[in-house]
Structures are given as structure tokens and as C-alpha cells.
Image (spheres, helix red, strand yellow):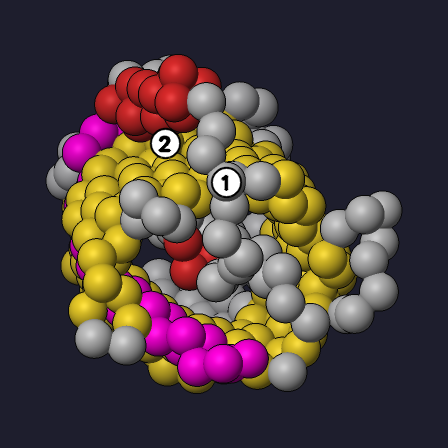
């Protein structure tokens, strides 16, 4: 979000922070698991300039569109919706029209925001269902209300060029779910995701950098008795602002790294030791238009996965818009 102009800070510290973020994104890591290889953590959700916590009192309307296309290796056995499938191909289109409000009174010295992101999803999954009798190819497609992300706490502290962020998100299983169906609108379990972030803005130079990291804690899917392992995730970005008319064009890179550090808990009929990891990096472009007390931001990013294990491998495309007003 747009913020007051910061003063100059230590370039050595900036370089260290960026080197750590970029090197973390590129290193292959061992990890644990998630039912179906896909969970509530979605790379690119909170990664760039447009995703920082608001520092201006008032409302924020943040509609987001995400497209994902990816597939599993045909040799990979995957637990999904009470089944074991191989050669899965996944296509997801999701729209999440978020609304947030930032209070005038600070909490613990921070600007305090609450909000919610309902979603509408279109999901198509194809794969081969494995059984003792025969393997059956199937294609399932659904469209409807997806799961909802509630944000009871989104906080921002500012100090010169730096902004420190904290978010506590609750993922509610509001989407439809059916055992034995490859494609579902929802995941059918609750999850919480505490996230901390560090952001740097040198407005005179137009340089911005952000790092967000958190842990996803998953509840049990009561219909399949499957609990996905806890996931550590890190998203980072660097962006350069360029003056363009009344606003600014932003150009940069964003990337992610995620791994699960605790094992899945399941009743034993699913694939044992199903372990997942994923990372990726790609370009991001945007436009920022200050309008007095109101602000308009638009951002498009492409995030291909470059290293995966026991999850689909593909690419994410994000289109995000923020309109901020008092």
C-alpha cells in the first residue's frame, strides 16, 4: 500500500536481506506433506508491494484473480478426496473479492486492520483412479463458492524506510466438498496461518523489497480422517518504481519457497510418507496511482514453479487490484 516517504537506511542491511530471500527461494529443500498435494497456502497470495498491510485509516477493496495450471507425474500416487490417484492434471480459476478496514486508533503502536476474502472457484481435475480391480481414468469439474479467508488481525508498524507486518488468517471450509470426487470447491478443513513480514521502501530511489514468512496449521478433514502436515512458507519480492504520468509503473521479481516440516496424520489407507516441497520465481509488473487520500494499485504477476516434489508442477498467474479510500 502507498505510504509516507521514508528516509535513507543502511544499504548493507538491505543487501543482506535480499540475498537471504533470493538464496532461500532457489535452494531445494526436503519437506513433508499435504492431502492432494495442494493446501491453503497459495504462492503469491502475500508477496509484493500491493500485499503489505495498510497504514492509512479507512477501507480497502482488494479483488484478486488467480489462475493455476499444473500436473503430477504419471508415476506419482496421490491421496485426494479419499482416493489414490496418479497422473493428476489440475486447472483452477479463483476470484476473491476482499474487503478490509483499517482503524484510526493504533493497537500496540501499529495500524490495525480486519477483513475477509470470500472466493468463487472453477476447478477441473483429471487423473487415473487406482483400485484392486482396475485403474479408471476420470475427469471431474466443479464451479461454485470456495473457501473463505478471515483476517481478524493485520498489523503494520512503520520506522523510517521499514514496515513490519503481522497477519493472522483463518481459513474457513465454506466450499462444497464430496469424498470420491477429484475436483472440489473447498478443502473441507479449517486452518490458521500466522504471517510476519518485513518491507523496505526507498521512495526517492523508487526501490521496494518485501519478505513474508509464515506457518500453515491444518485441522483434520473429518470426511477422510486426514490431517495435512504443517507448512512453512516464504514469499519475497523486489520492485522498482518508475514515474509514469500521474502515477508509477512497478517492475520486479517475486518468488516463493514452501516446505512441510511435520508428517501427515492419516488412517493408513493412503500413500505413506507422502512428502511435498515447492519453489518458484517469476516477474511482476504493476501500476500505482495516488489520488489525494485515495489510492489505486494494479498488479500482474507470473509465478512458475521451478522445483517441486509430491505436488503439482505448473504456474500461477495473479491479477490483483487495490482501491483504498477514507
Classify residue 241 as left or right of residue 212: left
Q: In this view, does 64 lie to the left or right of 265?
A: left
In the rendered image, residue 325, in percent from the top left (x then y), is placed at: 57, 82
Q: Which residue is drawn at 39% across and 49% down?
A: 203
Q: Give the range drawn in magenta.
A: 285-310
User: Does residue 326 sit above or below 308 in this rendering?
Assistant: below
Dot 2, how many residues are within 10 Å of its Cα: few (below 14), some (14-19), or many (20+)?
many
Above or below: residue 319 compared with residue 86: below
Query: How far apart are labels 1 and 2 at the CA level?
Result: 31 Å
Is 305 inside the magenta-drawn segment? Answer: yes
For label 2, the residue is 257
Dividing the picture into quadrants, the one containing residue 154 is bottom right
Residue at the spot of label 1: 7
Depth check: 306 or 107 in front?
107
Neighbours of disc 1 within 10 Å: few (<14), some (14-19), many (20+): few
Could you say which quadrant of the image residue 293 lies in?
bottom right
Horizontal arrangement in the rendering, residue 194 relative to residue 31 (left or right): right
Residue at 29% of width from left, 33% of height from top? 279
Q: Where is residue 187 in the image (x, y as percent from the top left)?
A: 52, 59
Seen at 43% across and 44% down, the residue is: 201
Q: Main secondary structure of the magenta part?
A: strand
Which residue: 46% across, 76% down?
Answer: 295
Expressed as whole percent of the image width and height from the top left, the position of residue 241 reads: 27, 54
Does the magenta segment cover residue 105?
no
Check disc 2 and report its element: helix, strand or loop.
strand
Quarter of the figure with the C terminus = bottom right
Label 1: which secondary element:
loop
51 and 190: which is toward the camera: 51
Amino acid at each position: 500500500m502507498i505510504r509516507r516517504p521514508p528516509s535513507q537506511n543502511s544499504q548493507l542491511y538491505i543487501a543482506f536481506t535480499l540475498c537471504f530471500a533470493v538464496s532461500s527461494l532457489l535452494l531445494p529443500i526436503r519437506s513433508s506433506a499435504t492431502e492432494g498435494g495442494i493446501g491453503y497456502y497459495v504462492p503469491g497470495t502475500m508477496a509484493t508491494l500491493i500485499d503489505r498491510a495498510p497504514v492509512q485509516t479507512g477501507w480497502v477493496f482488494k479483488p484478486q484473480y488467480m489462475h493455476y495450471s499444473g500436473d503430477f507425474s504419471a508415476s506419482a500416487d496421490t491421496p485426494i478426496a479419499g482416493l489414490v490417484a496418479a497422473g493428476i492434471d489440475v486447472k483452477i480459476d479463483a476470484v476473491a473479492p476482499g474487503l478490509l478496514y483499517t482503524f484510526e486508533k493504533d493497537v500496540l503502536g501499529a495500524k490495525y486492520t480486519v477483513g475477509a476474502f470470500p472466493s468463487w472457484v472453477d476447478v477441473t481435475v483429471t487423473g487415473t483412479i487406482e483400485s484392486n480391480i482396475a485403474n479408471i481414468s476420470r475427469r471431474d469439474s466443479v464451479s461454485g463458492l470456495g473457501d473463505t479467508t478471515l483476517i481478524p488481525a493485520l498489523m503494520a508498524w512503520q520506522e523510517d524506510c521499514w514496515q513490519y507486518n503481522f497477519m493472522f488468517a483463518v481459513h474457513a471450509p465454506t466450499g462444497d466438498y464430496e469424498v470420491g470426487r477429484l475436483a472440489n470447491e473447498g478443502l473441507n478443513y479449517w486452518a490458521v496461518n500466522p504471517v510476519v513480514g518485513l518491507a523496505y521502501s526507498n521512495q526517492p530511489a523508487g526501490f521496494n523489497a518485501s519478505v513474508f514468512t509464515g506457518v500453515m496449521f491444518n485441522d483434520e478433514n473429518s470426511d477422510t480422517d486426514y490431517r495435512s502436515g504443517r507448512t512453512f512458507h516464504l514469499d519475497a519480492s523486489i520492485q522498482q518504481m518508475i514515474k509514469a504520468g500521474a502515477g508509477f509503473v512497478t517492475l520486479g521479481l517475486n518468488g516463493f519457497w514452501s516446505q512441510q516440516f511435520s508428517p501427515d496424520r492419516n488412517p493408513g489407507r493412503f500413500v505413506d510418507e507422502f512428502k511435498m516441497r515447492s519453489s518458484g520465481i517469476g516477474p511482476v509488473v504493476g501500476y500505482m496511482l495516488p489520488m489525494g487520500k485515495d489510492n489505486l494499485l494494479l498488479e500482474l504477476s507470473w509465478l512458475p514453479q521451478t522445483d517441486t516434489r509430491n505436488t503439482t508442477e505448473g504456474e500461477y498467474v495473479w491479477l490483483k487490484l487495490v482501491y483504498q479510500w477514507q
